[in-house]
Amino acid sequence: MKNLLLFILLLATLAGHAQYNPEAINKKAVAIYEKAITQLQDGQVKEAIPTLQKAIELDGNYVDAYLSLAGVYAELKQYDKSVELYNKGRNIDTGYFRFFSLPYSTSLAATGKFSEALNAVNNFLSTPNLNERNQQNGLRKKRSYEFALQYAASHADDGYVFSPQNMGDSINSSTHEYYPSFTIDDSIFVFTRKGEGIRENFMESMLKDTGYYKAQVIDGNINMEPSKGAINISQDGEWLLFAGYFQQQGFGNFDIYISYSTPEGWSDPFNLGGNINTEFWESSPSLSPDKNTLYFSSDRPGGFGGKDLYVSYRQANGKWGAAANMGPLVNTKGDELAPFIHADNQTLYFTSDGLPGYGGFDIFVSRKDSTGKWATPENIGYPVNTVDNEGSLFIASDGVTAYYAADGADTRGGLDLYKFKLRPSVRPLRTLYVQGYVLDSKTGNGLPSSVDLFDDKTQQPVTHLQTDETGFYFITLPFGKDYTFLVNRKGYLLYSDVFRLATQADSTYKKDILLSPISVNSSVTLKNIHFKTNSYQLEPVSLIELDKLVLLLKDNPTITAQVNGHTDNTGADASNLKLSESRSKAVVDYLTSKGIAANRLKWKGFGASKPVADNNTEEGKAKNRRTEFVITGL
């Protein structure tokens, strides 16, 4: 609305300099036009449309009426109509129109006509005696349009179609909705809705077969304080993080709080403390899927611009470590806001007005490599990014479906929540998950345990977490890789499993894990010990499990064990027996090389004599090629 009022002021200023003759305009049209200007000044934008149209009907050469109506449609983001009306005004008087080439360029750019927009802004910049403010505005828009053309030239047309869909009346209302956030299975959907005055309400909706239920205000004290905003739900649905101004708990401005899911509903909010919050502004929290990393924005001193992105890591004791600025690769002299870490735990989206873009705040993406280093942020491109300001983005676990707030032509009122398919080149990894309970195999009681996920290709840890007191765990699995999954607890045998997701079809894993107490004759099959074909040379991926086995033996220095090797039935029995013996010895040799006393370990090969599956299938043969670890003494 501010831009529209400036536009009206410009019209009033230029009326005396018009090349067309205002005195020749139909007097009734002028009177009606003046009524429309009053409506616009009073904020009655939509009501002014038929009034301006009436003025044009009375006098088809009324340039100011065309230009005002073009400005109104631009304000309503109906840019095609805006461009059409600007063109009509320009055709009547090109000289007078030059002063309006700047807003005209904005409407052109909003429809994707960046080359025409660049011509329009260059025409504006050639206007004699432009003041410094107009020059700066024109040059800023020129840089944006040049960026847009360069981006289009460097990104081949992939056939991408941007078609956002309004999420409908169950979610959106006559006021603003923004900051969408979902659990990994999409079953719980939370967002923020603008209330009266400064009030913002946290809303919740549950997924049903036909869509989402009518959103309701989240129960509990989480909604008691009116001044709050950005909300983020953990991927497992157990935590809510949000920004708010709680005078009795805060450090002086907006702080980040957490609420926990309980059988009675969401808990009272807790301030995340001085390692996260300061006397300055903190907001837009985004929690990693393993709940070990928190990203947020703050305007505290010592950054690179106004608002910067920060990161904090949860310590072994459950406390959050001191937040650190994410550095100049991400942060600029402008503002960085609304970080969102995807369920793959390696793709970060955020908004910035300091990086090259289309104008205002654009959405950018940065990807983390295997060493934990973030790549240079990439603009996710038009038409998601536009000449307007883009806000928070959320992307579902499928890596395709994205959600954001916009005031589209079909809005129920103000900002609505929309969903759309993300351009393939800027998508995160499709992500699955596994969840369940770690239990004692004899008593069935839950066991708080350590859970680790490793990338088989790099042998690097992907996720480390502790189960809760009931033994519950939740871990995300980015699609396209193979993983080794390990569970440890002192006094129990190691548990291992393998998730082959490099080529496997989508699936959700729910797996309760039974840990066996360490006792004589208790055993575990090591699921990811591999050797080169017809060889006893260990493949690198095997070291993931073997290193955990080393820790088990060091934590329990009195136990003795035997490593048993098994093969499938391919080849001669004698050869298989010898190969299995050599392979079991290779495992023992590795363990002793890591400091385990040789007198604690034995090895034995069984060849193909003890199959656990059908050797007539490749899957069965793979199960029979195994390495077992058996406790022989305590």
Image: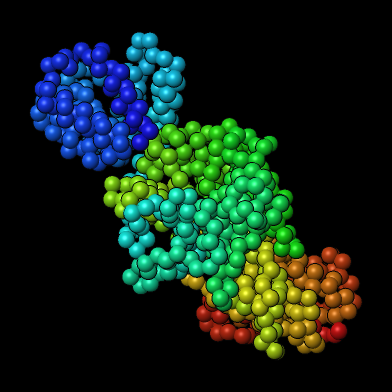
Q: Which residue is nearer to you in this view: 528 or 309?
A: 309
| Residue 202 in view (yes/no) | yes
Instruction: Relative to 616, say whether 214 is above or below.
Output: above
Q: Which residue is nearer to you in this view: 385 or 566?
A: 385
Q: Residue at x 28, y 50 (%)?
A: 410
Determine whether, in the image, residue 87 is placed left or right of residue 331. left
The total number of labels drawn is 0
Instruction: Relative to 389, say whether 467 is above or below.
Output: below
Q: Residue at x 43, y 43 (%)?
A: 390
Determine which quarter of the picture holds residue 85.
Answer: top left
Residue 319 percent across, percent down from the top left: 72, 60
Residue 309 percent across, percent down from the top left: 60, 44
Residue 216 percent across, percent down from the top left: 42, 66
Determine whether, in the image, residue 284 is placed left or right of residue 448. left
Determine which quarter of the picture holds residue 44.
Answer: top left
Q: Residue at x 55, y 34 (%)?
A: 334
Residue 474 percent across, percent down from the top left: 59, 69
